[in-house]
Image (tube, rainbow, N blue to C red):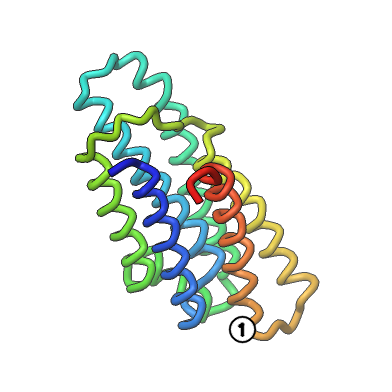
Amino acid sequence: MNSNYFAKINFFGTLILTVLALINKEITIFYMLYLFWWQAFIEILSALIKKIVLKESFVEISKVFFPTFFVMFAYVLFIIILFGFVFSFYDIKLFALNSQILYFKNDIFNLNLGLTTILAISHFFSNSNKNLDFGPLSAKMLILHISIILGFTLNFGIKFFLNEVDSSLLYLLSAVPFILLKTYFFWKKNSTLF
């Protein structure tokens, strides 16, 4: 199987599970950012291990992966502290939901991570040696960059412009822009596959 097959399964699986989380009202901006972070981290870690197993030069590996892991470390702290705790501090329901996600007590989030992990392992053992694009400005990292900016915009927009917002609208605003962003990047990368 080629890597495009794994990318399709991951994309559509994430899309279906995100819609399921949306229907169950188990989704927040933190959920989406943390999920995108974990998906990128799992795929980057899988690619790193594959390059080590293939005995590629340590210098070449470190040139690509060190900056990426540095940015990933900064982002996870940023996402957990700001979106997980600070922005939800005065909303106990939102804080509780973010805590469930952070401590892996949210079943749909865990299924999403499980799917990503299984596909990363499958891709690892496949014969696909496609040159993976990882770096601070790769597509996966651009999704994270834009998602964090979008998360800030949504968070402040919801708080300052939609004072009394219907909870259904809040869940939609938490998921739909991120789904559209991921869809755009997936379509852009794989437009020749359809």
Dot 1: what SS?
helix
* Residue receiving disc 1: 168
Amino acid at dot 1: Ser
Q: How many labels does the image show?
A: 1
Is residue 177 something one can see in this rendering? yes
134 shown above or below 109:
above
Occupied quadrant, residue 157: bottom right
Horizontal side of 121 relative to 3 (left or right) equals left
Is residue 96 something one can see in this rendering? no
State the residue at coordinates (45%, 40%): 72
- The percent position of residue 112, horizontal first and vertical second, equals 36, 63
Q: How crowded is mark 1: few (under 14 residues within 10 Å), some or many (20 or more)?
A: few
- The percent position of residue 57, horizontal first and vertical second, equals 29, 14
State the residue at coordinates (29%, 60%): 114
- The percent position of residue 156, horizontal first and vertical second, equals 72, 64
3 shown above or below 97:
above
Occupied quadrant, residue 166: bottom right
157 shown above or below 25:
above
- The percent position of residue 107, horizontal first and vertical second, equals 33, 73
Q: Which of 80 and 67 is in front in this view?
A: 67
